[in-house]
Amino acid sequence: MTLQGPFVGTSAVVVRDDAVLLGRRLGAHGADTWAFPGGKVSAGERPEVAAARELQEETGLRAIRVSPITWTNDLFPDDGLHYVTLHHLIEAEGEARVLEPEKAAEWVWWRDLDNLPTPMFGPAAALWATGWRPGQVHAPA
């Protein structure tokens, strides 16, 4: 099977008070999985700008500081898609709320970082598999 892509995606990893923001996805590929806010990087858009934009569009949170973490190579054979996802650690202000109900059922501040909810969306699971955890800026080499 041939996959479309690779497309460039971005994720906004927001950590606050030792909890990470996760949403339960609806609609597009990855439905009923837990994920960080994020989406596709538009042509000509800088990935960190896309991460901040997606965060605000999906949750209403406003990015104050954006730092790159790492990238993951994400294949979605059931959907015929290939993404390279650029993950960003974001400090944000405001309260998370569901602004795109067709994309996310809920946003939850998850405190048990050793036991994230399952199933995890592919890019989020791939980031966690690198060994990166809040408190680190970049993923381990």
Image: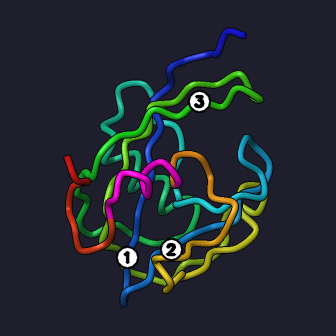
Q: Residues within 10 Å of mark 1 (few under 14, many from 20)?
A: many
Q: Residue at x 31, y 72 (%)?
A: 134
Q: How is the image coloured?
A: rainbow
Q: Is residue 88 magenta?
A: no
Mark 3 in CB contact with mark 1 (< 8 angstroms): no
Residue 33 image-quadrant placement = bottom right
Type of amino acid under label 1 = Val
Q: Which residues are magenta?
A: 125-132
Mark 1 touches mark 2? (CB < 8 Å): yes
- Residue 64 vs 119, above or below: the answer is below
Residue for badge 3 = 75
Position of residue 118 measured from the top left corner of the image (x, y, whole percent): 68, 66
Hey, which residue is sitting farthest bottom in the picture? Answer: 17
Q: Which residue is mark 2?
A: 21
At label 3, counting other C-alpha atoms closer than 10 Å, the crowd grade (few under 14, some 14-19, many 20 or more) is: some
Residue 127 part of the magenta segment: yes
Name the dominant secondary structure of the magenta segment.
helix
